[in-house]
Image: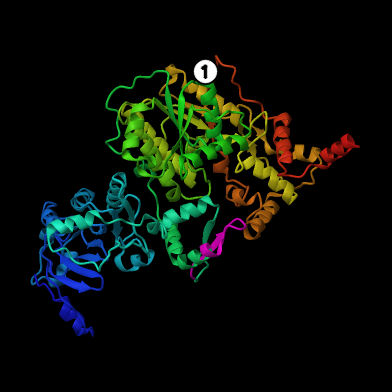
């Protein structure tokens, strides 16, 4: 094979200042130097001297740009490690996926190679196992996977179209997860990314160590400025954080025109600084949304549980002394915590996203106050600062292990509930977070897991009324639509895999959870409350019957905690649906009886009003639930002929010896909800109530 001189090629096309370096040769640069390292793999063990990896020493930092994740033998890097010491930052390529070596190097061959021979020597850069060994050799503080070719415009050049099951994606995910579990900052790069590293403070200009002993000492002293890392987060992580502030993006693609990015945000959230960032990263956002819209996710393939997650012994189920609860600051989670305090004597550890334990405790106290929960914050509640979206739940390795040895049972209620975000943005919290919970459940002693799922994981797959029994497995042929339901579907599949490996599991699938049946207090993102507020503000309601299958939060929380303590019910699933749902007509008629000025209009007219809200009124109560209304109320005959009926035998039998019953959906319950909205000044008092108040005060 001919090994061309890139120096001669570059000079021939007009570059005058070209420096050629051999392996381990160094070039001085301002503030440091650059070393050429051999490329030891990826290219079917061909000796490609025209290609090199670069080790950059700059202002006390060491950055390795390694083109290959794979290599002939990881032990070869041991010799380099002895020469160059530890590395602060490694950029590693993992795009190359098994093409015959002639795909890239055929023009350099002096004679043609038979296809059969070419197939025996393949390019190979997507190998997490060998990439991990490379990382272990150099002990970096940051690892970035680069040059994956995911940018949408590259498909016109390379024809590469990745899916979630593509080997480079799976292998790079493995590498990233392994790094994060070891406390190494790691991510896969896309588009443009600026990474800022703090320079080491020196009293004199940085000098290259004259001996290996000095060199090793200098690397131990290096510190990475973690604050700088967060200045430019990865595009997906950044969009996730913006979504938490209810900042949403949509991509409009007019015919024969460039895509247009549209941003909707609550008033006051788009600061000048944030607007500048949006302008700088607009191309990244468009590229990400374009890729997301065209990619197809294989959810069945997503539901793959780490094979190392399995119980090492049989679980011993006793009365718990210590409980781990996730999602305690959410609506259902707050009431689950209250019920755990009332129905058990255990100490409850609450995993909470916060900057400190004090902030976590304040979030819990504010949550109790906002939901009118009369519960004293006592020593039985232990705030635990963590994050479901992070490896080991955002805990240190030592704390993760220590708690795994102490906790007796887990209630995994935590999830990012957002019905308009895609699966990809919810995956880290809802899917990977569940995997980390399962890792925790199996670590040390096996711990029973009570998993809060949703009935939305099921969809109709056959004509007629389809009965879903509580212990029915999730059907790979019937995956739900919508990112949230998809993320819960994958998460529940992971839970059932762990259950099959011997972990004791109970699954609870509630339907739509509504406000407290006695106080009326509700979740601010609740569909029913937004519908009531929106219809009153708009002065309209649709002339259609929508099913109101409402479950008061006090009923659901009491029932889940009661059922979870019945040891004979372990490894069962439970459905929570109202036995007697009602039509939205009952609600709209009640609002008119209470003398609210609401016109009943056709569904098409209602849709036109919603479109106006979507375009001009992002702060309107109906704005966030617009995607839940279809473009047309008219269903096809097939759609009308397909429906689900949920079996609730386990739930009814499990509660049969208790006094816990689901309240009826009637005028009394709906009036409780409406009165709470009025008392909270979220809707105006009706003319009827205003008249009664005036009479009482006159």
Query: Dividing the image into 4 quarters, which one contains the C terminus?
Result: top right
Q: Nearer the viewer, residue 256 or 556?
A: 556
Q: Which residues are magenta?
A: 258-274
**How many numbered discs?**
1
State which quadrant residue 269 falls in.
bottom right
Neighbourhood count class around disc 1 (C-alpha, 10 Å): few under 14, some 14–19, many 20 upward: few
Asked if residue 478 can be seen in this view, the reply is: no
Name the residue rendered at 30%, 44% in the picture.
181
Q: Nearer the viewer, residue 588 or 508?
A: 508
Percent position of residue 285, x then y = 45, 62
Verify whether residue 263 appears in magenta: yes
Asked if residue 77 can be seen in this view, the reply is: yes
Q: Nearer the viewer, residue 439 or 298?
A: 439
Q: Which residue position is annotated with label 1?
A: 653
Quick one: which residue is furthest to the top in this view? 657
Percent position of residue 188, x then y = 33, 56
Percent position of residue 637, x then y = 57, 43
Query: Viewed as shown, does residue 454 lie left or right of 219?
Result: right
Q: Nearer the viewer, residue 684 or 338?
A: 338
Verify whether residue 229 appears in magenta: no
Query: Dividing the image into 4 quarters, which one contains the N terminus?
Result: bottom left
Query: Viewed as shown, does residue 539 lie left or right of 621?
Result: right
Query: Viewed as shown, does residue 20 lie left or right of 194?
Result: left
Percent position of residue 449, x then y = 41, 28
Q: Secondary structure at mark 1?
A: helix
Query: Viewed as shown, does residue 70 lie left or right of 627?
Result: left
- In the rendered view, tell whether residue 120 sits above or below residue 481: below
Quick one: which residue is furthest to the front in this view? 203
């Amino acid at each position: 094979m001919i090994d061309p001189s890139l120096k001669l090629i570059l000079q021939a096309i007009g570059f005058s200042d070209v420096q050629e370096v051999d392996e381990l040769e160094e070039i001085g640069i301002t503030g440091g130097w650059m070393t050429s390292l051999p490329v030891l793999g990826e290219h079917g063990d061909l000796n490609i001297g025209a290609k090199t990896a670069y080790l950059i020493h700059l202002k006390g930092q060491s950055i390795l740009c390694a083109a290959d994740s794979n290599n002939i033998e990881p032990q070869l890097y041991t010799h380099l490690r002895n020469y160059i010491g530890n590395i602060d930052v490694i950029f590693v390529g993992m795009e190359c996926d098994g093409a015959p070596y002639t795909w890239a190097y055929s023009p350099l061959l002096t004679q043609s190679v038979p296809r059969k021979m070419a197939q025996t020597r393949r390019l190979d850069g997507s190998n997490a196992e060998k990439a991990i060994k490379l990382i272990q050799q150099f002990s970096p503080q940051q690892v970035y996977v680069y040059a994956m070719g995911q940018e949408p415009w590259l498909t016109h050049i390379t024809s590469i179209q990745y899916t979630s099951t593509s080997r480079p994606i799976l292998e790079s995910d493995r590498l990233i997860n392994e790094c994060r579990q070891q406390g190494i900052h790691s991510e896969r790069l896309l588009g443009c990314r600026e990474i800022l590293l703090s320079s080491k403070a020196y009293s004199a200009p940085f000098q290259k160590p004259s001996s290996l002993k000095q060199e090793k000492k200098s690397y131990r002293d290096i510190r990475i400025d973690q604050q700088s890392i967060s200045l430019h987060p990865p595009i997906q992580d950044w969009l996730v954080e913006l979504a938490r502030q209810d900042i949403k993006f949509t991509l409009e693609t007019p015919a024969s025109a460039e895509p247009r990015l549209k941003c909707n945000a609550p008033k006051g959230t788009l600061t000048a600084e944030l607007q500048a960032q949006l302008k700088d990263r607009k191309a990244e956002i468009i590229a990400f949304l374009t890729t997301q819209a065209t990619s197809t996710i294989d959810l069945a393939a997503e539901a793959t549980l780490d094979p190392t997650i399995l119980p090492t012994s049989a679980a011993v189920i006793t009365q718990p002394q210590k409980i781990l609860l996730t999602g305690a600051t959410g609506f259902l989670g707050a009431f689950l915590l209250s019920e755990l305090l009332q129905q058990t004597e255990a100490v409850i550890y609450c995993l909470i996203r916060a900057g400190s334990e004090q902030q976590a405790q304040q979030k819990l106290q504010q949550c109790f106050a906002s939901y009118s929960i009369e519960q004293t914050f006592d020593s039985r509640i232990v705030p635990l600062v963590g994050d479901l979206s992070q490896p080991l739940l955002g805990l240190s390795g030592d704390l993760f292990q220590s708690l795994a040895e102490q906790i007796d049972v887990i209630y995994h209620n935590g999830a990012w509930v957002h019905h308009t975000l895609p699966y990809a943005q919810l995956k880290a919290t809802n899917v990977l977070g569940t995997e980390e919970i399962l890792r925790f459940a199996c670590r040390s002693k096996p711990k029973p897991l009570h998993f809060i799922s949703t009935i939305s994981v099921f969809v109709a797959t056959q004509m007629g009324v389809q009965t879903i029994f509580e212990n029915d497995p999730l059907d790979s042929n019937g995956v739900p639509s919508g990112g949230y339901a998809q993320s819960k579907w994958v998460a529940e599949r992971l839970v059932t895999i762990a259950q099959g490996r011997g972990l004791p599991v109970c699954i609870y699938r509630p339907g739509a959870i509504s406000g407290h049946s006695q106080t009326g207090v509700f979740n601010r993102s609740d569909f029913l409350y937004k519908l009531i507020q929106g219809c009153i503000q708009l002065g309209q309601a649709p002339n259609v019957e929508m099913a109101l299958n409402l479950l008061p939060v006090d009923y659901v929380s009491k029932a889940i905690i009661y059922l979870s303590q019945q040891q004979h019910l372990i490894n069962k699933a439970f459905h929570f649906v109202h036995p007697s749902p009602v039509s939205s007509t009952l609600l709209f008629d009640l609002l008119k009886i209470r003398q609210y000025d609401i016109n009943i209009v056709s569904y098409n007219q209602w849709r036109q009003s919603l479109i106006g809200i979507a375009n001009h009124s992002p702060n309107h109560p109906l704005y966030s639930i617009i995607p839940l209304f279809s473009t047309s109320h008219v269903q096809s005959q097939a759609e009308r002929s397909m429906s689900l009926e949920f079996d609730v035998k386990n739930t009814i039998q499990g509660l049969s010896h208790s006094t816990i019953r689901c309240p009826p959906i009637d005028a009394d319950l709906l009036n409780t909800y409406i009165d709470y909205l009025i008392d909270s000044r979220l809707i105006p008092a009706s003319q009827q109530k205003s008249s009664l108040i005036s009479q009482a005060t006159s």
